[in-house]
Amino acid sequence: MAQLTTTDMVLIDKIFGMYGGYVLDFSNDRFAAFFNRDLKIDIYNDRFSIYGTSKGKHLRAFLEISSEADVARALHALWEYRETGMLDRGEAETVPNARLRLSNLLQKLGGKPLAPDPSAAPASPAAAEPKGPSEGKLIALEQEFLALAAMDEAPHQRGYAFERFLKHWSDVWGLEGNASFRTTGEQIDGSFQHDGSTYLVEAKWHSRPIDAAMLHSFQGKLLERPDWTRGLYVSYGGFSGQSFDAFTARRLIMMDGADIYHALNRRLDLGEVVRKKARYHSERRQPFARVTDLFTT
């Protein structure tokens, strides 16, 4: 049985459209013929009907109960079919780093990696090394975040794990993260360097939104420090509407769990996320701008 994680299944869905019930542009007959002819698999066998009768649900069942070798073969064949159709129609790729991410998944399953992009220009011998963290590090970081939601330990243990994750995230993007530390009479959940400023981090893994009193408390810590000190308040459960009405943010920006998910899933540079949030706050006096609004493409 293939060991596919939640992140793996999300990637497969993004590329092939599994959870929508459809799979690429297949009709029912062509979907059955594709699996029979190319893979020698009866995709409409009853054992692949455990979730329902749509093409997407048959594919989901196949991925969950088949061997890693069969899953790798199927994903490889589906990718080739998808790529051929996109080239014929002149369409551009819409899933960020789709080829590399699926290729890494195929290798994890013991399959062969995908061939290089045939439409990509050959690299110049003098071309600079690609900047930023490897895809493997970004995948691991995304999985670390998703695993936090599945933790059943005591709340404070999950809080510590959340702080560690935030440090890992800043380190991966070269922001020189520091772990949590205590000064006289106060606790700081972490810090990082960005554009000449030191950002202190307040991290809360709560299901309920953060209220104005907690924001005021963190801002008080910032205002007692040098002018180059900034703050990032990270609340997994978001922020209450009343908190914005009763709080005027100075030198701090905000981020919630959805922001983290979208930034990780879209492989966004954390430094650029912080930069855009800070600029938006300076221009609009709004410390909480959603990642999906700041990065619209």
Image (tube, rainbow, N blue to C red):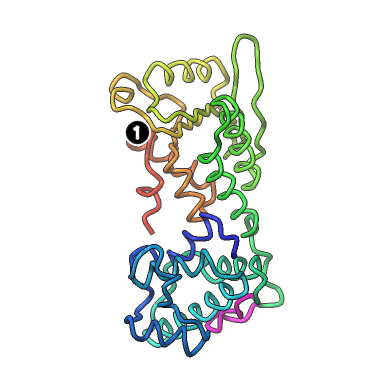
Question: Quick one: 68 or 235, which is closer to the camera?
Answer: 68
The answer to which quarter of the image holds residue 155 is top right
Q: Residue furthest front?
A: 46
**Which residue appears at 53% of the width and 46% of the height?**
146
Q: Secondary structure at mark 1?
A: loop
Q: Is residue 225 visible?
A: yes
Q: Is residue 116 one of those drawn in magenta? A: yes
Which three-letter amino acid code belongs to the residue tagged 1? Gln
- Residue 105 vertical position relative to residue 263 in the rendered view, above or below: below
Q: Is residue 167 one of those drawn in magenta? A: no
**Which residue appears at 53% of the width and 60% of the height?**
8
Q: Please identify the dominant SS of the magenta region.
A: loop
Residue 291, percent from left and from top: 41, 46
Q: Which residue is mark 1?
A: 286
What is the crowding at mark 1: few (fewer than 14 residues within 10 Å), some, or many (at least 20)? Answer: some
The answer to which quarter of the image holds residue 297 is bottom left
Q: Residue furthest right?
A: 125
Residue 255, percent from left and from top: 44, 36
**Which residue appears at 50% of the width and 78% of the height?**
79
**Which residue appears at 45% of the width and 39% of the height?**
257
- Residue 9 vertical position relative to residue 224 in the rendered view, above or below: below
Residue 258, percent from left and from top: 42, 43
- Residue 162 vertical position relative to residue 113 in the rendered view, above or below: above
Q: Is residue 16 visible?
A: no
Q: Quadrant of the N terminus?
A: bottom right
Q: Residue furthest bottom?
A: 37
The answer to which quarter of the image holds residue 88 is bottom left
Question: Quick one: 129 or 50, which is closer to the camera?
Answer: 50
Residue 4, percent from left and from top: 56, 60
Q: Which span of residues is magenta-colored?
A: 113-123
Exactly how many numbered labels are in the figure?
1
Question: Quick one: 253 or 24, which is closer to the camera?
Answer: 24
